[in-house]
Amino acid sequence: MSLEEIVKEKRKLADNLPIFAEHDSPSVKNYTSLKESDLLPLSRSTRSGCAGMQRNITTHNGSPCRLFGGGTFKFLKVDEAISSGLMKAEDIFNDSYDKMSAINQGYFNDGFYLGIPSRYQGDRMINILHTGDRDFNVRNLYSIGNNSSARILENYVITGNTSVSQGTVIRVGENSSLDYFLLEDEENTELSYLERTIIMDKYSTVRIHHLSLPGKKSISRFRIIQAGEHAESGYYGAALGKKQEHLDLEVFIDHRAVHGKNDTAFKGILGGKSSLIFRGFIKIAEQALNVESFLMANLLLLTKEAVGNALPVLEIFNGEVKAKHGESVSNISEDQMLYLMSRGLDPKEAKKAVIEGFISPIIYPLPEDISRKYLQIVEEVIGDD
């Protein structure tokens, strides 16, 4: 099918799907309130092109702007990549599992293809900067060839009270590795929808480091599909709520092949009147024997008004696996504060020490400039409370 034919089908599905579908399980029900007026900007956004001088790999309102660094990579618009034979039209799509996903796929108007060749061994970070000052709805495809090793950092600079929807499919080739750093800084958005679908070939390795500073309503979806045998993945995420932000985060690990391994760890820190719902899914297919998959989520509430919930789901269809989960929602205890204050720390320093200790397993494996920035934001949260 052509790109236009697929989009037409996806758009029809998006128009017919209700905003909220009824589910028997509380783990898959909707926790983010949405209205038709919230979704209209995403179905009416248009291409806007680039603004000013760009550097590295940059997008503006979803439009690809510039590739800095020579001809090693392929970086071009989706329709150009299809016409050039670099990708098929269907490669950029996945299942439309809810209204937001369907709108992203049926009404996207821009996006780019990033191709990393086989046998690429890159030591330097591939930096992708997403800028925006208006509503946009886009889809992208990253293709990493076989026997390659890549490090990708994505960052956002979004201004204005905008609505943003971005879906990206990342295909990781056989025997390749990807370290993927995503700093989701969307504090200025009215509504943001971020979707990442990672499809892993055999003997591939993916490590995702995700930091979220949500906007007024933020919905983030990660789907890691281990399509090939001996695939290994890890998701390590953290989120900070300072005022009245809301984050609806879902991490779905889909084991489809034998000898897969996965580790999922998430930390949420909620101050002010912020709220967060984390849903962790592990699905192990009948043919996916000898899989090891683990899930851990911990939320720390700094105020009485903050709201957090962590929901695990395990769907296991064979008996030859190792899988477990653990979740907690807690406050900073008086005992912790008293102990640290007895060692000479004032209340603010004691609170900072507890929070940094809580989030350190996620933060400290990051590059120093990213971890330093995030710890500065932690200090802002403490100051606000």
Image (cartoon, rainbow, N blue to C red):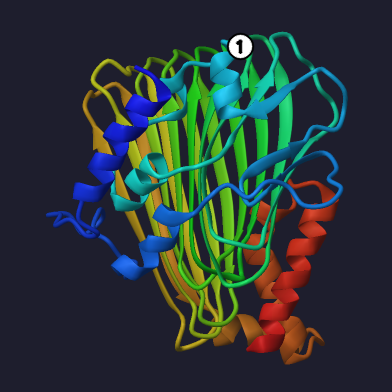
The image quadrant that residue 208 belongs to is: top right
Using the image as rendered, state which of residue 360 and residue 271 is in the foreground: 271
Q: Is residue 313 above or below residue 316?
A: below
Please give the name of the residue rendered at 79% of the width and 86% of the height, measured from the top-left corner. 345
User: Residue 104, relative to residue 36: is it above or below?
Assistant: above
Classify 125 as above or below 48.
above
Q: Nearer the viewer, residue 50 or 181?
A: 50
**Number of numbered markers:** 1
Name the kind of residue labelled 1 in the image: Asn
Quarter holding the N terminus?
A: top left
Q: Is residue 336 left or right of residue 260?
A: right
In the image, 153 versus 358, the foreground residue is 153
* Residue 66 falls in image quadrant: top right
Q: Position of residue 78 (x, y in %)?
A: 57, 28
| Left or right: 305 in relation to 378 | left
Label 1 sits on residue: 175
- Please state if 130 lies on the left or on the right of 313 as rendered: right
* Residue located at (70% from left, 72% from top): 378
Position of residue 85 measured from the top left corner of the image (x, y, whole percent): 56, 10
Is residue 329 visible to the viewer in this orientation of the structure?
Answer: yes
Left or right placement of residue 60 versus residue 270 in this view: right
- Disc 1, SS: loop
- Res. 34 visible in picture: no
Examine the rendered structure and indicate whether residue 291 appears above or below residue 118: below
Position in image of residue 119 (x %, y %) = 73, 9
Q: Quadrant of the C terminus?
A: bottom right
Q: Quadrant of residue 58?
A: top right
In-front residue for pair 115/106? 106
Give x and y (percent) for residue 16. Answer: 19, 48
Q: Residues within 10 Å of mark 1 (few under 14, many from 20)?
A: some
Name the residue rendered at 67%, 9% in the picture: 147
